[in-house]
Image (cartoon, coloured by chain):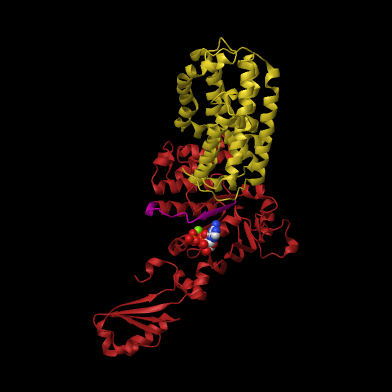
Chain colours: A red, B yellow
Amino acid sequence: MAQLRRQARVPSQPPATTTTPTPPPALDVRGVRKSYGATVALDGVDLVVEPGTIVGLLGRNGAGKTSLVSVVAGLLRPDAGRVLVDGVDIAHEPRRARALIGLAPQDTGVYLPLSVRDNLRFFGGLSDLHGRERATRIEEVGAALMLDELMDRRARDLSGGERRRLHTAIAVLHRPRLVLLDEPTTGADVQTRRELLRLVTNLSREGSAVVYSTHYLQEIEELGAGVALIDHGRIVARGALDELIRQYGSSALELSFTGAVPPAANVAGSRVTGTTVRIATDDPAATAALVLGGLGAGASSLCSMEIVRPTLESVFTTLTGQRLSREVEPAA
Amino acid sequence: MSSARRLGTIVAHELRLARHDPVSIMVLLVFPVITIAFLKPAFRPALVEGGFTHANGAEHVVPGQAVMSAFFIVSLVTFSFFSEHGWATWDRLRASRATSFEIIAGKSLPRIAIGIAQLGVLLIAGVVLFGLHIRGNGFALVPLIVTFSVCLVLLGVAVTALCRTAQEAGAFAYLGMVLFGAIGGAFVPFDLLPAWARAIAPLTPTYWAMRGMRSVVLDGQGLGGVGLPCAALAGMGIVFAFVARRRLRFDETKSGWA
Ligand SMILES: Nc1ncnc2c1ncn2[C@@H]1O[C@H](COP(=O)(O)OP(=O)(O)OP(=O)(O)O)[C@@H](O)[C@H]1O
Ligand SMILES: [Mg+2]
């Protein structure tokens, strides 16, 4: 019987046969605007996040990521628009909505004089977790974020990365339906990053929706997350990673030679840097065939050929006209 | 039910944080004991001259220094809010299930208890160490101590509401301690104050606390002696609570220290 009902909820079924209404999205943001004086931080944001999915909120400094997260968490009142968390309006029933959210703000927020365990116990208690249940959750989350050895250490005596892990642990202690992580990997080393990403993946497997703001495209790619590109307070693109890349990403063919780039490789859309030529193209394979055929004797100095697949970075560049990560820009 | 439990969680948490703050204990207990030892002989003549021939000075100095140092509770309350901003935990509190009432009450209750304990300990220390003789019914001081502590904590919440930085709040609280202490007759006995100070003294909580103390300790009264002072302190507490309610904005970004 239960199985039948579950089958009836498959979205392709016509509504007439469904016995239970489809569950509301974990997060449903509509037309949210927020200004600080003359600065428009959010300029009409719409964003829907389904349960069990991860959305990478990607944008440059000042794009509006923290403002959006703060509005969703009920910390900031929007000038217009509405936010539903699991169908609960954050403006009308803030306490019910807040109980569904786990927030790790951009700034690390922990009680420095208290131990890791006391920090977790306090926030657990605020989320109405007590006794055995709380102790078990602290163990689980502590293990997931490599805090188990540090439980009795004062937060003041933790390293920056360790503190960041505690900061994130606090947000997920009560198994929130919606997890908001604002740049969780700030100051994290390779291992901490890996554990944080694994935690996020596990959360989504357990059915939580995760909004994950970051500057690092690679993290979104590693998470296989959906993407919401935010720029100047607007969501400029939203979708699955590969879809966005297919739609907006630009691919290229890159050839390197032992000596100067032969003139035959200098086709339309190419850019020569030293002994390497990069040819922007929608169909790298066809272009490769064309260029190789045209090289003739010049092919002898070819030492490598690479099809450069489109990346999220190129999607971002296409959509905003700017690069996201500063570190890949040439030094000024 | 869950609200009461959350309140308990916050209270326990605040007490845990207070344990990590030994400096406050120094300010609340050790300093006044030292000043009492130094000031006691100096105030004996004034009391004797006022007709209390058996007085040894402790009758003014012990309540006076206790009341003055209790003002530090105001700073403790403001610290407890501003350090949340310093630790960046304020937004986490706000984003939690706790209501603003639970947060404020959770921060206030432990400090009210600290105020009561501090005043009680200092008065007992006065009796044991400094020969303080309470002529009236000492238990009449209990409601006075309680209302005074509540009043100071509410003043602390009001000061927090009015200030944007921890420095401002600290200066405000310190100024309050010194000014109110002096004008209210905690430092120099009321009778020796200049006329202008005596005229405005009833505007300070210190005055009412001292008046209640004096009527029990020196004048030998019981509960009847503390009725009016308690009512006045409660009235001021209501005013402070009103200011706090009007001005405290939970979404204000304050600059605090950790
Ligand atoms: N309290 C504030 N007062 C005034 N302006 C603000 C305030 N907070 C944010 N802003 C402005 O709003 C815009 C969006 O800021 P927000 O913090 O949301 O960006 P962000 O995407 O989180 O940036 P970052 O990657 O640097 O964290 C910025 O132009 C910022 O200067
Ligand atoms: Mg931000």
Q: Residue at position x 48%, y 47% from top?
A: A167
x, y (%) of residue A305? 33, 78
Query: In which quarter of the view is residue B13 placed?
Result: top right
Q: Residue at position x 55%, y 54% from top?
A: A180
x, y (%) of residue B72? 53, 32
* Quadrant location, the C terminus of chain A: bottom left
Q: Is residue A176 or residue B125 the one in the foreground?
A: B125
Residue A188 part of the magenta-drawn span: yes
x, y (%) of residue A45? 61, 65
Q: Give the residues drawn in magenta, as a range.
A: A177-191
Left or right, residue A92 beside residue A110 = right
Q: Is residue A64 visible?
A: no
Q: Is residue B126 or residue B258 the one in the foreground?
A: B126
User: Does residue B8 sit above or below A127 in this rendering?
Assistant: above
Q: Residue furthest right?
A: A16
Q: Residue at position x 61%, y 12% from top?
A: B135
x, y (%) of residue A294? 33, 90
Q: Is residue A37 or residue A119 the one in the foreground?
A: A37
Q: Residue at position x 61%, y 15% from top?
A: B218
Left or right, residue B121 beside residue A325 = right
Residue B131 part of the magenta-drawn span: no
Query: In which quarter of the view is residue B212 placed?
Result: top right
Q: Is residue B221 or residue B245 the one in the foreground?
A: B221
Q: Residue furthest front?
A: B195
Q: Is residue A34 visible?
A: yes
Q: Residue furthest top?
A: B54
> Number of numbered discs present?
0
Left or right, residue B134 beside residue A154 = right
